[in-house]
Amino acid sequence: MAEATFNFPRGFQWGTATAAHQVEGNNANNNWWAWEQAAGRILHGHTAGLACDWWGGRWREDFDRAAESGQTTHRLSVEWSRIQPTPDRWDEDALDHYRQMVRGLHERGLTPLVTLHHFTDPLWLYERGGWANDVAEQFAAFTEKVVTALKEYVNQWVTLNEPNVYATLGYLMGTFPPGDQNMLKTFQVMTNLVRGHAAAYHAIHRIQPEAQVGIAHQYRGIEPYRRWLPLDSAIAHFQSRMFNDFFPAAAQTGVLRFPGWRKRIRQAKNTQDFLGLNYYTQDFVAFHPLRVSEAFGKRFFDPQAALSDTGFIANQPQGFFAALQWANGFGLPIIVTENGIEDAADHLRPRYIVEHIRQLWRAVNFNWPVKAYYHWTLVDNFEWDRGWTQRYGLWELDLETQARRKRPSADLYAEICQANALSSQMVARYAPQIFADMFPNE
Ligand code: BGC
């Protein structure tokens, strides 16, 4: 049997990523909580509820799990509505709670990466129109408060999680609050997110000059279905520019560019110290004369690709490589801030992990400056509009009892973290069905 080991450089960081609303529980003062209470918005009427009960203290046992399995870092987010429950009040107890959490990570040998905004907004901000307005000043004030409180333990920050997803799902597709379907508003929100990011970036650096600051950007591969057809290629290129390029390009050049929309935001120029990359899957796009609102492109998964439980994600590891190549174009250190798959029975996840880590290794071997990888996620958590129907955890969560059960993928990932490598033995043990393809004998 062929043997090989894909080694990662010394100091490469391995972790998992989480977000406040998805794990904390009883996060009742934000727009998502309100949205969940109304009928018809979340699949099966699910709500975040107690989630993984991190606010009740179960972060301790989950951080133990992460540390025991060889992880060296953890990405978590802080909840704005807890820290600033009303416009004129800061909750020092909430800040202290987060201080304990990030100290708890250090005590377990894990370096924290903290996200300031991961999809949720305080109700007071939301009721005034949220990011449809220029709220950069408010976001910077919140950022200052958090950075001042946590800087003893944290020097890596993500200002915004997936601003492209936040704007598109909330203002164009209408599946996230506030449920709008308005192109103009989507541009406005994107513009205000760029302003907010820039203000937070500068605020962080004023308080902590050595900080590393970026966004967690969702890159979704969009490939022409028929490469030979110029229409398919043109649509793929257009959609990819809109979804993938707009925000990080604005944070690099200080200029926002959509077709028919150009705005200079000087303060946004060079406001990324690293490129945070969230990658899950990739689509094909084909010209379709009736898909007007989707720029005449019909999107679908490669019919050959294995699909996740609910068909939400296709296993497309080569798309991850393409995403890393795209990220490398920015000339910044790269942090893979999310990557994972929903798979309750853990049938596909081991293979997904193996194939994606192998692409990561290829990227590292091209000397692309990838510094860290965060798997999404540690324990099953609340999946937004899809409620609890999608299970992304290395550990399974029993919602009734709060019990955690380890999936085989947790052991696989632990072996990778501990060895700082992916070996053929691991593949043989956890994903034997792809062994012969990955390590051919001749
Ligand atoms: C989000 C996470 C989410 C994950 C899986 C990402 O777009 O940042 O919050 O849980 O996708 O759906």
Image (spheres, grey):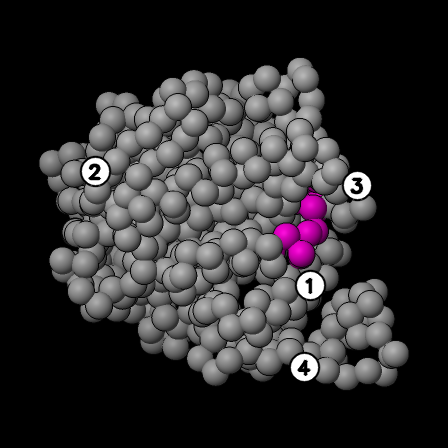
In the picture shown, does residue 168 fall above or below 375?
A: above
Upstream in sequence: badge 4 or badge 3: 4
Please tell me the numbered disc located at residue 355. Answer: 1
Main secondary-structure element of the magenta-colored stretch? loop
Q: What's the residue type where badge 4 is placed?
A: Thr
Q: Is 303 or 222 nearer to us in this picture?
A: 222
- Residue in the image at 13% along x and 40% along y: 89
Please tell me the numbered disc located at residue 165. Answer: none
User: Residue at label 2?
Assistant: 136
Q: What's the residue type where badge 2 is placed?
A: Ala
Q: Quadrant location of the C terminus?
A: bottom right
Confirm or deny contact between disc 1 and disc 3 (CB under 8 A): no
- Residue in the image at 41% along x and 30% along y: 258
Q: What's the residue type where badge 1 is placed?
A: Glu
Residue 204: x and y in percent read 20, 56
Crowding at dot 3, Cα within 10 Å, few <14 / some 14-19 / many 20+, comes out as few
Q: CA distance from mark 1 to mark 3?
A: 18 Å
